[in-house]
Amino acid sequence: MPGDAASSDGPRPVSGKGAATRAVILETALASFRDRGYDRTTMRQVAEAAGVSLGNAYYYFGSKEELVQEFYAAIQVGHRHRAADALRSRDLVDRLRGVLHAGIDEMAPYHSFAGSFIKVAISPASASSPFSPESAVARQAAIGLFREVLAGSDARPGGPLARDLPELLWLAYLGITLFWVHDTSPDQARTRRLVDTAAPLVGRLVTLSRLPVLRAAAADVHTLLTALRPRDAHR
Amino acid sequence: MPGDAASSDGPRPVSGKGAATRAVILETALASFRDRGYDRTTMRQVAEAAGVSLGNAYYYFGSKEELVQEFYAAIQVGHRHRAADALRSRDLVDRLRGVLHAGIDEMAPYHSFAGSFIKVAISPASASSPFSPESAVARQAAIGLFREVLAGSDARPGGPLARDLPELLWLAYLGITLFWVHDTSPDQARTRRLVDTAAPLVGRLVTLSRLPVLRAAAADVHTLLTALRPRDAHR
DNA sequence: CACCAGAGTTGAACACGTTCAACTCTGGGC
DNA sequence: GCCCAGAGTTGAACGTGTTCAACTCTGGTG
């Protein structure tokens, strides 16, 4: 395999001139994603609406997928913004539930297109994957959000898992997102119910994890998470 | 075997004449998936290698994705076959670990292509999704495998979760598969380690779930799973 | 001014999955 | 033997994401 080494570095050139053009293309694409969804957004339409040629769009964005990546970034910023509200409470369950609902709120307008977006995110080779090196910054920001959920609460989790909890909550959030994508109930009510059930459960487990009986299980989970993590990841 | 099984799974015509043609196309496609992977398998190549026209391939299979669906089915049959070995033990952890490793063994030859396959499986709209109505039969078979893991063991799980356990284990297996797809370690060693850690953990949790302290948490998990399930599904 | 390297830009071209109107073949009724 | 409904089959055509050789424009250097 020649292994085309991907583009490895940052997206594309960002000198003075092209930056404006790049921004126009990006805005046009994001608007089209919002209005038409992923599949119905064609590179030709984006290029035309942005007033550039098809080839020029590919000069700034190596693929349609790179556009999606920027889309994720925008959503994540929105999530963090919304989450601030929920972080006023000191109660762990309230904080967690609030942050999770904030995430669903932020994604809600895009639910009908989520099915096509997730195809891109789930592919291991994709830079948009939550686990990809390219997503490292966004990933750490997301994990940081859950670290904040824990740190600002009056619950003080202990045990061998305390340090892993932010990452575990982030993984759970990914799972909830995956569920949300598949949720066809009106207004994704089942996902809401899932969050309302899961948040207290997490609170209960955090409390229980101090019990000696659960020490061994918690240690197992810690080992499992260690096995799961790629060699390099630390924070 | 998959050719003339008069079962009602074929979304396309299955009368006498075309069945042979259908089988040839299918075999050709599966071989190409194995040898070249998903993306490098083109419908034109499959059609040509099968000795039919492009349009004719589409007469029997509505889309390339439908071919993938059959691919999954073939893998699942292989998994069940391999799993039989592991089901000789009576120890729950041994059984579970064996069945999980059998699944990884079965998928191993396709790991390099898994990234492109999972794109298809993960899409909610796709019939290949593990949660789709079209996959109901395969899904029940898979859940049944884990029911067997539990039923044939000397551990007798109790509590409010006992009935949910096969489904939970199946979900965990899906998660492991998802991890496997992203696992770039040599020979997917990290996934192996994950299984070796997760199996004893499950055993421990099954034992612990009898404790009164965990009753409430177990009930929460049961509620969560109920919220998770689509309206119709039981059995 | 003349020149040029290189960023910026273009549209044609490619391979792909998918569709479709039109064709051929087959078996059964008369 | 004739016919025909419908299964089986065909290749051209469409729209897509992506590539690429060639072009234009820009800023700096001599």
Image (spheres, coloured by chain):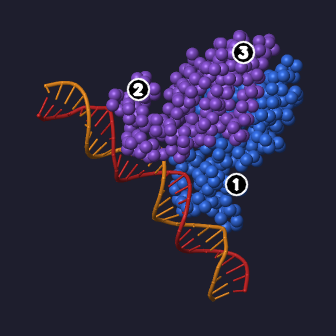
Chain colours: A blue, B purple, C orange, D red
Residue A202, image x and y in percent? 77, 26
Which subunit holds the residue at mark 2? B
Left or right, B65 with reference to A231: left
Three-letter amino acid code of the residue under disc 3: Asp
| Marks 3,2: beta carbons within 8 A | no
- Residue at 67% over, 54% down: A5
Mark 3 and mark 2 lie on one chain; the one further toward the N terminus is: 2
Left or right, D6 with reference to B44: left
Residue B118, image x and y in percent? 59, 37
Mark 1 Cα-neighbour bin, 10 Å: few <14, some 14–19, many ≥20? few
Q: Disc 1 vs disc 2: which is toward the camera?
A: 2
Mark 2 Cα-neighbour bin, 10 Å: few <14, some 14–19, many ≥20? some
The image quarter in which residue A167 lies: top right
In the foreground, A103 or B94: B94
Q: Circle 3 sits on which residue?
A: B91
Q: Disc 1 vs disc 3: which is toward the camera?
A: 3
Alpha-carbon span between mark 1 and mark 3? 47 Å
Which subunit holds the residue at mark 3? B
Residue C20, image x and y in percent? 35, 44
Three-letter amino acid code of the residue under disc 2: Asp
Alpha-carbon span between mark 3 and mark 2? 39 Å
Q: Circle 2 sits on which residue?
A: B4
Q: Taking the image as drawn, is residue B129 in sight? A: yes
Q: Circle 1 sits on which residue?
A: A8
Q: Quadrant of the C terminus of chain A?
A: top right
In the foreground, A167 or A36: A167
In the foreground, B58 or D4: B58
Same chain assignment for discs 1 and 2? no
Q: Is residue A105 above or below residue B98?
A: below
Q: Taking the image as drawn, is residue B169 in sight? A: no
- Residue at 73% over, 23% down: B199
SS for callout 1: loop
